[in-house]
Amino acid sequence: MKPLLDETHDPNVLSWVESANVAGTDFPIQNLPFGIFRHRNAKGPRVGVAIGDRILDVAGVLGYLEDNRAKFAVLDCASTGSLNALMSLGTDARRVLRRRLHAALRREASDSDQRAAWGHLFALSDVEMLLPASVSDYTDFYASIFHATNVGKLFRPDNPLLPNYKYVPIGYHGRASSLIPSGIPVRRPCGQTRDGDADPKFGPTKALDYELEVGFYVSGENKLGEAVPIAQAEEHIFGICLVNDWSARDIQAWEYQPLGPFLAKSFATSLSPWVVTMEALAPFRAHAFARPAGDPAPLPYLLDPGDQENGGIDLWLEVALLSPRMREAGIAPVVLGCSNFRDMYWTMAQMLTQHASNGCNLRTGDLLASGTVSGTDQSARGCLLELTSRGKEPITLPNGEQRKFLEDGDEVILSGFCEREGFRRIGLGTCRGTILPAA
Ligand code: CA
């Protein structure tokens, strides 16, 4: 697996959509992430591509472009209200579409291309972004060894990492029905908790947390009973997004043994609206996590030279918090954690191959998430459980407020971007959610 670079990655190409050329934009012409949007002047939910501060109606523009391969391959897929059909096409068709959209949006585009695209551009501020895919199954992994160690220490100071960790990409089956798009508020969940030796109680969680994660969507299916070889795993990945796996730590602590997370996680999971394709990420691929001397090598079914060489992604991630009092005072969101996705112990290919290794069939549009992305130092912790040592060491916000866990009205904002010399910076956009009081 070698990342394929072509003219769509050329950092010198500019777009006639001027906002796409502004330094620091998440959506230059080299990105072209897909999402599903609704606009009062467009029929139904539509497939869109972000370009600067605009969104291009993909089916709309394809209908007007000169006959071409991209049009025949994807027009039907782009006319639906989810990305699933597009996801099922696979990498070749996706690459053809990317090159065609790139050609239509670059400054050197033909007059007819520009006219066609111009008529199908909307301001991002005028559209509503929906869930990108119809997700049948959602699985959450635990792929950061730093997160697993930090959390493990809180519960087992002498033995933080369980013996399976370096062998098995650990995961659990999440809940697909409560996946929500960025911007939809999250109601504080109620659940059963137990404080010390007191009798268990039912009520609103007092330990609501976020988890900074990366998600990836499955492209194409494997048949029930058939595994996905590690060398082919990335052909089954469409692209990535930001995931906030909201967690109620007090409910989790009481319910998680012996079967793992359940109601502490299933009340809501927020997703960023944009899916950045594997093609857009090609310039930012990195070596898989370098295992320290003494760690076991991955078992052969999880080991591929190509994946070891390029299976990581140099992707910076950030989580920020805005409290209601900060918002009133005009204070900017405060960054609580900043980590890099290349520090994950397991690659996306390893997670996907693990998932299918028992013959479990993955389906197009399934969502796999990485687990909380944390790094080595204190500033690289992807959830409050780690940052505050389970509430024992509260953090102080810029206006003096303190937080052990999230309070009602708090807004959590995830963001991510890739940056590398010789290439144009691309971003994932944001994934936001504000906490509503318990019902
Ligand atoms: Ca998680």
Image (spheres, rainbow, N blue to C red):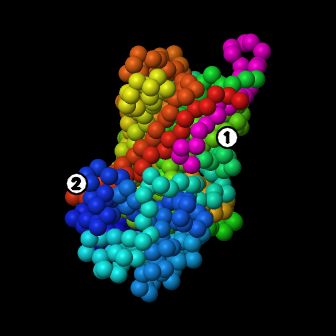
Q: Using the image, determine if residue 436 lies above or below residue 228.
A: above
Q: Is residue 227 left or right of residue 201?
A: left
Q: Quadrant of the C terminus?
A: top right
* Viewer-proximal residue among 23 and 297: 23
| Label 2 sits on residue | 421
Residue ID for mark 1: 266
Looking at the rendering, the stretch of residues picked out in magenta corresponds to: 181-201
Q: Residue at x 67, y 40 (%)?
A: 266
Residue 39 point in image, percent of width and height: 53, 60
Q: Say few, some or many: other residues with alpha carbon within 10 Å of mark 1 (under 14 / 14 to 19 / 20 or more).
A: many
Amino acid under label 2?
Glu
Side of 219 where 53 appears, left or right: left
> Does residue 280 appear to the left or right of 437 in the view shown?
left
- Percent of width and height locating residue 326: 43, 25
What amino acid is labelled 1 in the image?
Ser
Q: Looking at the image, is 247 positioned above or below residue 308?
A: above
Residue 366 percent location from the top left of the image: 61, 58
Give residue 43's quadrant in the image.
Answer: bottom right
Residue placed at 36% from the left, 52% from the top?
26
